[in-house]
Amino acid sequence: MNILSRRKLWNYKLIEYQKKRGSSIVFGYPLWLTIDPSNICNLRCVFCPTGQQRGTRSQTIMPLGKFKKIIDTLGPYLFHIDFCNWGEPLLNKDLPEMVAYARRFGPSTKIDTNLNIDMSREDARRLIASGLDRLNISVDGASQQTYEKYRRGGDFEKVMRNMRLLTDVRREMKSNTPHIHWQFLVFKHNEHERESAKKMSHDIGVDSIGFTAPFCAPEWVSTIDEYNNYIKKDDNSVEFKHVQTQCNWLWDAITINADGSVSPCCSVEEQKDDFGNFFSKPFFFVWNNACYRKARRYIMTKIQSTRANICMRCDHIGASNHASIRRD
């Protein structure tokens, strides 16, 4: 085991110990990073605050230099990095360089994209050569008519061309990565196209296709229970099916937005609810500031305190927990 691996393992054990104890002050570094290369988007997706142009965040693209400073601090401890949150990451032209820089520290890497961009063969080569592990492409339908109902402003055929381009170039480069995944959010209006999408994914040559239950308005929910995240109550209100009492984010994960602001999890829509800025102070002063300590205490005790922050107002604790982190 090399020095970097030993450092990650030591940090992992420290974080797990402090999480089990419910420590409000955390001495370990996060294991999981969600980072937003761009919070600007080219689509107007119906339930996305960016797509709805609500103005919840100042629009910006993260400079490569700032990204490197973040990774120099967190990279030696990270198991995984998600390159996406409130915008379209491929609008940041430095994204392949960002992935390649992060890969030096060994975390797995994933990009979530709508792939509704003008992609050249050279763009595809740069992305594949970056060492990216997984590319999730959001395509919620198997035709323009169904696709654009949620992905407003999207061009279905452009996405199909780009997926074919990526699979062709990956084959030419004799690369096993990235794993190319078609992500299909299942709504009432597109649930009938699942089999068509499966056939198209096979014909294009992507590695997998997955059908996901979205967080959406009740009238959009699929009639298939497997793709419904909600329980309808007698008063016609709804609640989440899978809410947990434990939130992992506050101990072992962090979200950093395109302007460097820090959110307690990937679900924090508004800039005013952030817990500080990565570049404002040394990392542990941000990681253990009053907002973080108060939120961690609340998750463990459920006792409200004065001036409640976003975690105390959360109505879906645990619903957006990141995937389990493995040491292997």
Image (tube, grey):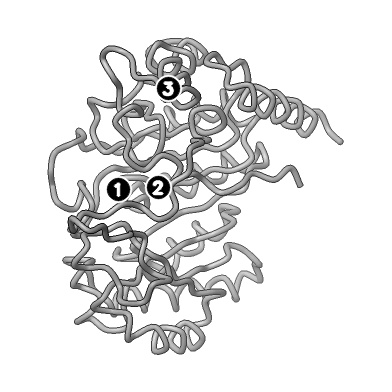
In the rendered structure, are the residues bearing label 2 and label 1 in contact, judged by CB atoms less than 8 Å apart? yes
How packed mark 3 is, by other alpha carbons closer than 10 Å (few <14, some 14-19, many 20 or more), is: some
Residue lying at 56% horizontally and 74% vertically, measured from the top left: 207
* Above or below 24: residue 127: below
Could you say which is closer to the camera, residue 119 or residue 89? 89
Residue 43 in view, yes or no: no
Rendered location of residue 15, percent (x, y): 65, 26
Left or right: residue 14 compared with residue 90 = right
* Above or below 17: residue 87: below
Q: Mark 3 highlights which residue? A: 298
Q: Nearer the viewer, mark 2 or mark 3?
A: 3
Residue lying at 73% horizontally and 28% vertically, measured from the top left: 13
Q: Mark 2 highlights which residue? A: 84
Taking the view exactly as shown, the residue that stands out farthest to the front is 234
Amino acid type of disc 1? Gly
Q: CA distance from mark 1 to mark 3?
A: 30 Å
Residue 285: numbered disc: none
Left or right: residue 185 compared with residue 107 = left
Q: Mark 1 highlights which residue? A: 87
Q: CA distance from mark 2 to mark 1?
A: 7 Å
Rendered location of residue 52, percent (x, y): 14, 51
Q: Secondary structure at mark 2?
A: loop
**Sequence-wise, which precedes: disc 2 or disc 3?**
2
Rendered location of residue 319, percent (x, y): 43, 47
* Above or below 258: residue 212: below
Amino acid type of disc 2? Cys
